[in-house]
């Protein structure tokens, strides 16, 4: 193998290794961000479910017949 060929191969291997290393780092960052966003989505879904149950309870209270009677008595 000539000297020029060896230099070319060394440069090629170095550049290729650098590119592969950068791709791997970016893939790890993407996975980390994706797992964080999944946790945030799960947290938001739990909060939404809690709010829906609270609204359902409030609707039940307001539409309850006894609540309307109390409101009428208090307005007198």
Image: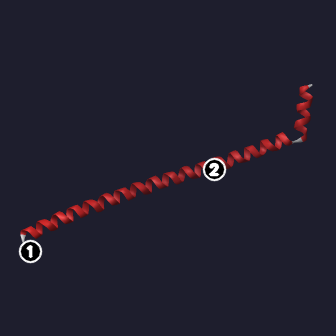
Dot 2 falls on a residue whose secondary structure is helix
The mark that comes first in sequence, 1 or 2, is: 1
The quadrant in which residue 57 appears is top right
| Image quarter in which the N terminus is found | bottom left
Dot 1 falls on a residue whose secondary structure is loop
Q: Is residue 18 left or right of residue 44?
A: left
Residue visible at 34% across and 57% down? 25
Mark seen at residue 46: 2
Q: Is residue 40 left or right of residue 66?
A: left
The quadrant in which residue 29 appears is bottom left
Q: How many numbered marks are there? A: 2
* Residue 73 picture location, percent across and down: 92, 29
* Residue 11 picture location, percent across and down: 17, 63
Query: Which residue in the rendered view is the most extreme toward the left?
Result: 2
| Image quarter in which the C terminus is found | top right
* Residue 52 picture location, percent across and down: 71, 47
Residue visible at 51% across and 52% down? 37
* Residue 38 picture location, percent across and down: 53, 54
- For label 1, the residue is 1
The residue nearer to you, when weighing 66 against 15, is 15
Packing grade of label 1 (10 A; few <14, some 14-19, many >=20) is few
Packing grade of label 2 (10 A; few <14, some 14-19, many >=20) is few
Distance, label 1 to label 2, CA atoms, is 65 Å
Mark seen at residue 9: none
Residue visible at 91% across and 31% down? 72
């Amino acid at each position: 193998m000539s000297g020029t060929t060896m230099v070319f191969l060394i440069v090629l291997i170095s550049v290729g290794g650098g590119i592969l290393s950068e791709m791997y780092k970016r893939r790890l960052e993407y996975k980390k961000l994706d797992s964080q966003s999944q946790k945030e989505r799960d947290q938001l879904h739990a909060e939404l479910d809690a709010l829906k149950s609270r609204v359902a309870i409030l609707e039940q209270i307001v539409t309850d017949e006894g609540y309307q009677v109390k409101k009428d008595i208090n307005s007198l």
